[in-house]
Structure formats: structure tokens, C-alpha cells
Image (cartoon, rainbow, N blue to C red):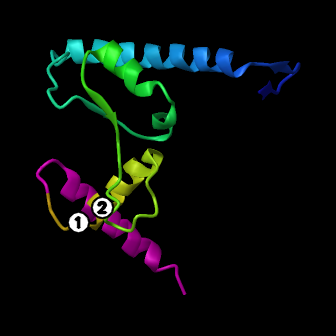
Amino acid sequence: IKRGGMSSSNYSKRKLDEIISARLSDIFELVDAHLKKIRRDGLLPAGIIITGGGSGVATIQDLARAALRLPSKIATLDPGQNGKVRDASWAVAYGLCMWGASDSEEDTGLAAAKKAKNSLLEWLGQFLP
């Protein structure tokens, strides 16, 4: 793999995997430190769900499980919807779209956010032909 810049250098797949694993371990250590701060470390019986583009890293589940001492799994999309997108990197966008399409109002400030979104869309609509 080539890296651009002032001078080019090559990294082997093995070296790149080591670098990525080290950074993921750092991230999971920060997550664990936050869980300890809020007194939830080891207290998430369902574990964690890994999503987004990084969920495709081959060893991410094992790294998360070891660092957090919690069950971990990669997010999956419900293939019953249309079956076309099954990549976990889309799970967050899919979930936000499903939430946005729902009519349920929650008492956590989400209703206010939806109302603001609708007001903004109405305001922008005045500029359309």
C-alpha cells in the first residue's frame, strides 16, 4: 500500500493491520475508561454493537471483546426490508432514516429536533420553484 506525501513509502498488509489494531485498541481503552467513569464497565449484559465503516475490520469484534470485557457483535441490517444493503457501515444511516420516518414522539428532546427539522424544511421550501 502506497502512502502519498513528500516521500512515498510502502506498508505491508501485516504492518497496516498492526497499526489499525493498535488504534482500535486505543479507542476501546478510551471507551472502557468512559464506562468506568459512569460506573457501567462490565455492566452492559447485552454487550456492544459495532457499526459504521470500521465494523468491516476483521478483528474488531475480538479487540472490543478483549478491551471491554463485554460481548460484542457487528450490526446487521434487517434483510426483510429490501435485502439490498447488508453492509454494517450503513447501519447508522439506516437507523436514522427509520427513526426519522417514525411518528413516535419521545420525551427526550427528539420531538423538538423533528419540529425544528420540519420548520427548516418549510422555510427552505419557499425558495423552490
Q: In terms of depth relative to the viewer, which is nearer, 52 or 82?
A: 82
Could you tell whether 81 is left or right of 40 in the image?
A: right
Could you tell whether 50 is left or right of 59 in the image?
A: left
Residue found at x 25% / y 25%: 71
Cβ atoms under marks 1 and 2 closer than 8 Å = yes
Magenta-colored stretch includes residue 108: yes
Residue carrying label 2: 98
Q: In terms of depth relative to the viewer, which is nearer, 70 or 112?
A: 70
* Residue 36 placement: quadrant: top left
Please provide percent x and percent y for residue 107: 11, 51
Q: Residues within 10 Å of mark 2 (few under 14, many from 20)?
A: few
Residue found at x 59% / y 14%: 18
Q: Reply above or below: 33 against 75.
A: above
Please provide percent x and percent y for residue 7: 88, 19
Q: What is the three-letter code of the residue carrying label 1?
A: Ser
Alpha-carbon distance for marks 1 and 2?
Answer: 6 Å
Q: Reply above or below: 25 against 122.
A: above
Q: What is the three-letter code of the residue carrying label 2?
A: Met
Residue carrying label 1: 102
Give, as a single range, the part of the protein colored magenta: 106-129
Could you tell whether 79 is left or right of 9 in the image?
A: left
Q: Which mark is residue 115?
A: none
- The quadrant of the image that shows the N terminus is top right
Please provide percent x and percent y for residue 8: 87, 21
Residue found at x 52% / y 13%: 22
Q: In terms of depth relative to the viewer, which is nearer, 123 or 31?
A: 31
Whether residue 79 is visible: yes
> Quick one: SS at disc 1?
loop
Residue found at x 49% / y 34%: 54
